[in-house]
Amino acid sequence: MFKEPVRHVRMISAACVLALLGGLGLEYFDNPTPFNLTVKNGARVYFPSDLSTGDKVEKKKPGIISSRRVFDATPEYADIRRRALDQNSAEYLLLLKKASDRFQIAVTRCVDRGSYDLIAEQGAVSVESGEIPDITDEVIKGL
């Protein structure tokens, strides 16, 4: 008499666990070993913003980027190059500020979408073992 409801509860429980794992995505299980990183240039760590040069941190999902490639992909920087604007002109500075804002928004989108816990410039952090993935293309998609 009680066997049927118990079996349904077990099936529902299993389905809930599978749905939870599917909802979280399997990226959390891709690399179970955290990265032990040393910050070589804190000014070039774009997320999180509270790291300083010399800090040693453990991160589960870091990514590195080429800011040059990201900036080159912004419409504002393309406009600067196309028009050969002088670096001291107000127009250049305004476009550069817009490109910088767009860059930061793209990094934030990448953090939110990819669950990254660190995004830094290539060479801004060193890792004891393994290789940090280059996520420049993901950031560019967020522009």
Image (cartoon, grey):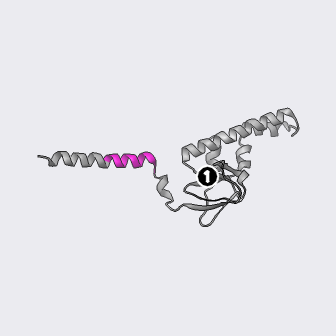
Residue positioned 49% across, 57% down in the render: 30
Left or right, residue 108 beside residue 30: right
User: In the figure, residue 78 lies in which quadrant?
Assistant: top right
Q: Is residue 99 above or below residue 36?
A: above
Residue positioned 28% across, 45% down in the render: 12
Can residue 43 be seen at all in this image of the molecule?
yes
Residue 23 colored in magenta in the image? yes
Left or right, residue 88 beside residue 12: right
Q: Is residue 99 above or below residue 136?
A: above
Label 1, secondary structure: give it.
strand
Residue farthest toward the left in the current orientation of the protein: 1
Query: Mark 1 = which residue?
Result: 118
Left or right, residue 12 beside residue 33: left
Query: Which stretch did the figure color magenta?
Result: 15-25
Residue 18 colored in magenta in the image? yes
Can residue 143 be seen at all in this image of the molecule?
no
x and y percentages locating residue 70 in the rendered image: 70, 45
User: In the figure, residue 82 lies in which quadrant?
Assistant: top right
User: In the figure, residue 97 lies in which quadrant?
Assistant: top right
Residue farthest toward the bottom in the current orientation of the protein: 129
The secondary structure that most of the magenta stretch takes on is helix
Question: Which quadrant: the C terminus?
Answer: top right
x and y percentages locating residue 105 in the rendered image: 65, 39
Give 29 or 134, whichever is nearer the viewer. Answer: 29
Left or right, residue 82 beside residue 133: right
Q: Is residue 46 above or below residue 37?
A: above
x and y percentages locating residue 121 in the rendered image: 69, 53
Residue type pointed to by label 1: Leu
Residue positioned 71% across, 59% down in the render: 40
Residue positioned 60% across, 41% down in the render: 109
x and y percentages locating residue 48 in the rendered image: 63, 49
